[in-house]
Image (spheres, rainbow, N blue to C red):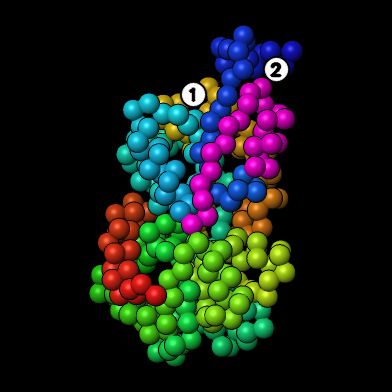
Amino acid sequence: MKRLGWLLLLGCADSDPTVVVYDGLDDEPGRIVVAQAENELPFAVKRLGDTEATKTAGLIHRLRSEALSPQANVFVCGEPLSVATLVAEGVLLPEGVILAGRVRGLVVRSDRDHAQCPSSWLDLGSDRWRDQGLAVADPRYGSTGAHLGVLRSVLGETEYRSLLLGFDVAGVRLVAGGNRAVVEAVAQGEVAFGATDADDVAAAQALGQPVQFLPLPLDAERGPWVMTAEARLVAPRTSEGVMYLDWMREKGTQVFRSAAPGWLDPSQLPTGLTYDPNLAAEEQSLAVEEALHIFGAR
């Protein structure tokens, strides 16, 4: 009877309704969430993900290209700048659910003494870490580019460029394959440090890799960059999308956090760096261009 009531509410009692979710988060927790949702909701859930290396860039391009005829009902994303941009463009609606949060920082080998690690991003840009080796994922994709946009929006053009030059002195190595490849480079001892996110390190630790995560503040006064994972409605609003979002709010957040190490309840997150996400989104392209110019292809 409950299923029939839901189907009547959806206006499709004689068909099998489907909610389409574009999911830019990791594949395994995304699949677990969808499987649980299908067990409890009166419709099928079709999930479309992206690759680790290009995570969420492909889905964002797809959402924009489909804006006049949307194919998705819900977008799940762990990059707040992308969410802010798509909301401003009218591709996404303001309505959403925060699933969890993660911190940006450094991955180092588990046997490395913390005294031999940078205390902040600005410290990492000092001459102390010359030629130690710093793995950075291709900033054209994923959270790396967004982080650069945040840094430029907070520091300004001159100080941001100075920081990039300091990173370059440390010995930047651009790697393909996303943050997971960054963690792998550190685990193998190819570089001393890797710029990455807490969840990628947690995933590597679960596989027994000898790495640890250091949440890195901008400096002694300004905290780390904290990112949230959100589920947002794709415009225009649909009954299926609203119902899926309601389920995510009531149960999906807990399912996701249980399946995704490194992602925390928002109440457990440290005080993050204060920044304007819209300004950071505007700065991102230029920030990435400057980084690629300074780091070059290695």
Compared to residue 30, the image places residue 241 above or below, namely above
Q: CA distance from mark 1 to mark 2?
A: 18 Å
For the residue labelled by badge 2, is the local secondary structure a helix, a strand or a loop? helix
Quadrant of the rendering where the N terminus is positioned: top right
Q: Position of residue 127 (x, y in %)?
A: 40, 89
Which three-letter amino acid code belongs to the residue tagged 1? Thr
Q: Which residues are magenta?
A: 31-53
Q: Position of residue 171 (x, y in %)?
A: 42, 82
Which three-letter amino acid code belongs to the residue tagged 2? Arg
Would you say 261 lies left or right of 128 here? right
Name the residue rendered at 34%, 54% in the picture. Answer: 281
Would you say 27 lies left or right of 24 here? right
Q: Position of residue 221 (x, y in %)?
A: 44, 74
The residue most toward the top is 14
Name the residue rendered at 29%, 54% in the picture. Answer: 282
Tell me if residue 294 is in the magenta stretch: no
Lower position in the chain sequence, tag 1 or tag 2: 2
Confirm whether residue 268 shows in the render.
Answer: no
Quadrant of the rendering where the C terminus is positioned: bottom left
Q: Position of residue 293 (x, y in %)?
A: 28, 71
The residue most toward the left is 158
Q: Which mark is residue 3?
A: 2
Name the residue rendered at 48%, 74% in the picture. Answer: 135
**Between 226 and 193, the one nearer to me in the picture:** 193
Would you say 165 lies left or right of 31 here? left
Q: Which mark is residue 238?
A: 1
Crowding around mark 2 (Cα neighbors within 10 Å: few <14, some 14 to 19, many 20+) is few
Name the residue rendered at 32%, 39% in the picture. Answer: 89
